[in-house]
Amino acid sequence: MDFLPPRNDAFSAPAMAAEGVARSDAVASNSAANRKLFKSRVPIYPKEVDGLYRNLKWAMMAITLSIYYLTPWLRWNRGPGAPGQAVLVDLAHERLYFFFIEIWPQEVYYITGLLIMAAVSLFLINALFGRLWCGYSCPQTVWTDLFIWVETRIEGDRAARIRLAAAPWTAGKVAKRVSKHAIWLLFAVGTGGAWVFYFNDAPTLFHQLVTGAASLGNYAAIAGLAFTTYSLGGLMREQVCTYMCPWPRIQAAMTDTEALGVTYRRDRGEPRGPHKKGQPWEGRGSCIDCNQCVAACPMGIDIRDGAQLECINCGLCIDACDDIMMRIELPKGLIAFDTEANVERRLAGKPARFRFLRPRTALYGGILVLVAAIMLLTLSFRHTLDLDVMRDRNPNFVTLADGAIRNAYTLKLMNRTGQARTLTLSVNGITARSVNVIGVGDVKGAVPLVVDADKVRTLRVLVTVAKPDLAASHALNFTLGDTNGKESRNVAAIFVPGDVK
Amino acid sequence: MAKREVDEVSGTETTGHEWDGIKELDTPMPKWWLGLFYACIVWAIGYWVVYPAWPTLSGYTHGMLNHSQRDDVTANVAALKSARSVKEAALRDASLADIQRNPELQQFAMAAGKTLFGDNCAPCHGAGGQGARTYPNLNDDVWLWGGKLSDIQHTITVGIRSTSPDTRQSQMPAFGHDGMLKPAEIGDLAEYVVHLSGRPANAKAVRRATKLFADNCAMCHGADGKGNRSMGAPNLTDNEWLYGPNREDIADQITNGHGGEMPTWGGRLSPEEIKALAVYVHNLGGGE
Ligand code: SF4
Ligand code: SF4
């Protein structure tokens, strides 16, 4: 590595500088020649490969990018007055729409559940197959891959790109560079553009964006995301994974030797070395040290050094090596999805085996199923009407002129459907002199109340009891029902009859 | 420092620091990190140019944008006011029935009223309007000056015994203090008032005080003691006692004629604010 002082074994053996003067082994460790505090990035020019994993990556790129770019354009009919966008985060009205699901702010635990599921899935997949997320679906990987693809189309493959980088600035080089960055920027702006559509009605906003009528916040969001996409996907690339992302560190602490991962089978490859046609393969390894796996790696590492923090498990080195193995007529799979434990087993002369069922995979799987089940259950029993009852505690009770006792309650009636509903409210379980809903009047039995579509209606209810028993507070029930009798909510509350002794 | 140590596995130098056998690699920072550092410095300089930054002898540098958070607040408050003006106008013109029929307007009035109540009324009437001795409870159905929305609105506007020329005015005489009644007579009257509120009382004292009540009290409190709202005279037959329910409390009130003061809010709050406040108080539960 260029920033290290040369290793000099002579340092350990003091020499004489002059007669009687021993030469010190001191090194000017902070001299400019010895020390570089900062390390420049060594550019990586990954060679394009062809094969199973490359095709899988193309497919994943197509799927993930399509989902990202197209989702906001999906329509979903929720009836008049409600947004017609299938996936929409409506910040102004505090609603989150996901196809048939509509989440209110007080139900944010569904998002928590989703995040828990996402995290546990990441752990589970990592324990089973290694960093598949990193290699195939992380936005950083997907966009970097896309940007490298653009680069390769314009500047050519690895060798051509290295040549171009070293070449003087001719008109041709300028043209290539300018068009590359222009296309990158185009994708970057599109990425930021797609993001804002998740928070607005996509067709409307698109029209506003083009005509310059959209709000400054939208343009700023697009510009911000365009900048990060361009710089992280185009310029920073592997440095994001190596220096910025916490996941490589976390996963390194969570993985074990039974987890699948892109593995150089050193039991088969070593000792490596060049091979001439016709030479026997006995007594040597299959690796011909052609370095094709290194040339293909977008992270700039050598998989033959073993599992490394930088490796995103993309499998491109597998494709590169399989191609070589075919050409030298050896079986494929010198580099393959395998486990470190299997390499050790084969070295010890034991058969390889895969242990997918391990305590940690069972635990992660269990948590995943549990959280998913809870989410599904609560979602399917989710009420479209809800009732909150808050009793006034200040004052705790009110003594009226004639000595009767009154308690006040604030009720929140929630209608989570797209239609206005007539609900009935009744108070039972207590012998009340009057039940007065402010604005509706004194009510006996069930009162019909209209709650508008997708709204909360707040009501104050006054319950008066003529001569309540002072021994203890009384229980009472508020019942909110649908007029068609399909849904009802029952909330228990208490009535404080005075200064209870 | 003697020999520089290089870690075998990574080929990187160590810093020479060691904790329990663990040595720290002296990995150089990536260059872009340094770039970020310089970018922040450039950003800071740009910030000085664009935004207010440096104090000067007589003020500060205003920056190209001439930005001021104080102006922002003023503008935001103005924007909020204009955003509210539609609903405020609707509130001003609406009757109680209108407001109660319109849940949106009702909620607007309640939200505004609650804040105003907390800021202006809670120190005396309590956070929930529950009142205290000498400060009326606003939750119950007892009103000295009337419990209709318009009554409440008027009371808030002009106050009671306030500095407003239109103030609601009533004065309970200090019968004992000013020598109009003798202590024994006051004792009898207190007994009479206890009797009025339906509690057991000394029959002889009540008989003695009957004429006294008719001569001195009935003018304001009514012959039946039920009070008179146009004069702010309290009902003496109910369970509500602003200055205390006991004989001593009642005798003290006849002797000294306490009367609290409620300030006028007319000049301090806008008519819309007073309306919202009145709706809030009315909706506490006692409104008529
Ligand atoms: S070593 Fe192989 S799997 Fe790992 S990042 Fe490089 S090419 Fe991808
Ligand atoms: S591509 Fe395969 S054969 Fe070539 S150096 Fe890498 S591991 Fe060895």
Image (spheres, coloured by chain):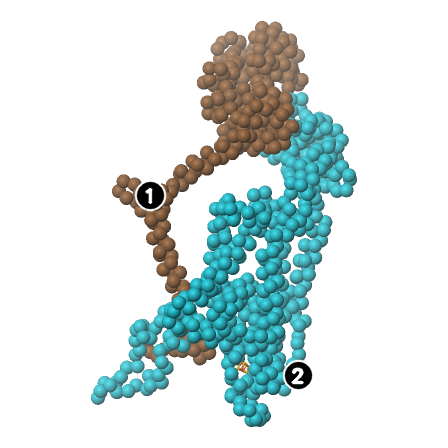
Chain colours: A cyan, B brown
Quadrant the C terminus of chain B occupies? top right
Query: Which residue occupies the extreme front position in the image?
Result: A171
Residue A207, image x and y in percent?
Answer: 55, 47
Residue A51, image x and y in percent?
Answer: 60, 75
User: Of residues B62 and A256, which is closer to you in this image?
Assistant: B62
From the viewer's perspective, is B77 left or right of A64? Answer: left
Q: Quadrant of residue B210?
A: top right
Specify few, some or many for label 1: CA neighbours under 10 Å numbering under 14, 14-19, or 20 or more.
some
**Mark sitting on residue A469:** none
Ligand 1 within 8 A of label 1's CB?
Answer: no
Q: Residue at left 66%, top 61%?
A: A368
| Residue matched to label 1 | B62
Q: Residue at left 65%, top 33%?
A: A459
Tell me the amino acid under the disc marked 1: His
Whether labels 1 and 2 belong to a single chain: the reply is no
Q: Residue at left 54%, top 70%?
A: A312
| Residue matched to label 2 | A351
In the rendered image, the vertical position of residue B239 relative to residue A273, given as above or below = above
Tell me the amino acid under the disc marked 2: Pro
User: Of residues A290 and A161, which is closer to you in this image?
Assistant: A161
Chain letter behind tag 1 = B
Quadrant the N terminus of chain B occupies? bottom left
Q: Residue at left 62%, top 34%?
A: A392
